[in-house]
Amino acid sequence: MFPNERKLRIIGLVSFFAMFYIFYQLLVFFYAYESVGLLIVKTLAVSAFFAITLWEPARWIILQVRRKWNDDKSNITRKIVLACILAPYAALIGLVRTMLEDQFIWTLPWKEPSFYLPMMGSNALFILVEVAMYESYFFVQKWHNSEMEAKELKKINVQMQLESLKMQIQPHFLFNTLNALVGLIEIDQKRAVRFTKELAYVYRYLLAAHDTQLIRLEQEFMFTQAYFFLIKTRYPDGLHIDIQFEHEDLDNYLVPPLSLQMLFENAIKHNVITRARPLTITMSLDKDRGLITISNNLQRKEEETKNGTGLKLLAKKFELNNMQGLQIRNNGSTFAVSIPLKTLNHESADHRR
């Protein structure tokens, strides 16, 4: 859970030992009550003992509290819990430390309790430094993880974009699309104009998609409709869509770009589409659970081999966006994928890195 924490642990222990030892050597220099050689041995032992006693239990407490209250919302709770546990511990160690020093190193008589207050305060300062070191470590670790996830997410976005572009620009697709456009120009110029606009919209959306982490579900839906319009031109009697929600229902949600289009592409790529065996793609929205489902009747192409690359990429993309709950179901007659939605933060229409 805490990678590379071992280095911080070693650095902290060595630092505490060095500070203790330097402090004791200064006292030896000014207040040597017995042979210096013996005092050096004693201070070495006491420095090691108190460095471990102060650092290790505090470290264990910090890690346990961090495991229980790890998210940003629990920052205040975590700090209060640490203060309530570590402050009394620092005071106790300060008291014990001073008593043992007086008896073991300096061979001095017991003193009034008020004499030990400065040492209790210095121990609290030591533990405060340790807490600050760990908080800094966790902050840097979180920042590093966020940067790595951002890079991985961008890589997946680009990969999904390239996969989609490859699907769009392969020769047979362009040939069929241009043929359909020529046919429409001859028989239905108004529809040909719409076809051209939708084609331009699809390419513009694909080229811009890799810059966006999350986008309005409404925009993704509009893009998917444009994509479907182009494909439908190739399968006028074999491809159908069934939308089971109102357009306004999409206003409050965000989704990773190309998510719906990839599911449409999967259905079209892997299933037979003919007038005799039409393919119907159904879209439904579950607002209570925050899911949108794309399903289709299953009629696999015999020559198709399943590799699942697209769905794996999609699942990873949702995981990196902290959107859990992607579901894939296949009952033999219907294939369905439900993807989780994120509620829209109205401060921004889309989230950009």
Image (cartoon, rainbow, N blue to C red):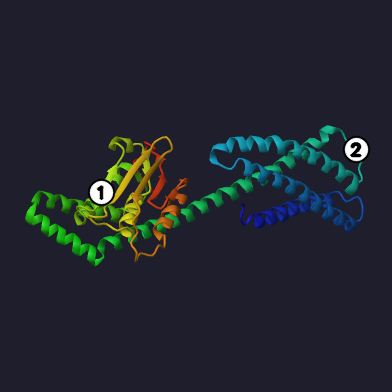
Q: Compare residues 344 and 234 and report the one nearer the observer.
A: 234
The quarter holding residue 171 reads bottom left
Give residue 217's quadrant in the image: top left
Asked whether residue 134 is in view, the answer is yes
Mark 2 Cα within 10 Å, few/some/many (few <14, many 20+)? few
Tell me if I can see residue 200 in this picture: no
Crowding around mark 1 (Cα neighbors within 10 Å: few <14, some 14 to 19, many 20+) is some
Q: Of tags 2 and 1, which is closer to the observer?
A: 1
Q: Amino acid at mark 2?
A: Trp
Q: Mark 2 near mark 1, Cβ–Cβ under 8 Å?
A: no
Location of mark 2 (residue)? 110
On the rendered structure, is 193 left or right of 337? left
Q: Left of 219 or right of it: where is 180?
A: left
Extreme residue toward the front, this view: 276
Q: In the drawing, does residue 31 fall left or right of residue 141? A: right
Secondary element at image label 2: loop
Of residue 145 and residue 119, the one placed in the foreground of this image is 145
Residue nearer the viewer, 257 or 122 = 257
Image coords of residue 330 (percent x, y): 42, 51
The residue at 64%/54% (across/down) is: 5
| Label whose residue precedes the other's in the sequence (2 or 1) | 2
Name the kind of residue labelled 1 in the image: His
Q: Secondary structure at mark 1?
A: strand
Which residue is at a point 23% across and 62% down the rendered structure image?
173
Residue that label 1 marks: 240
Indicate which disc residue 213 carries. Answer: none
* Residue 24 locus on image (x, y percent): 81, 50
- Front one among 198 and 175: 175
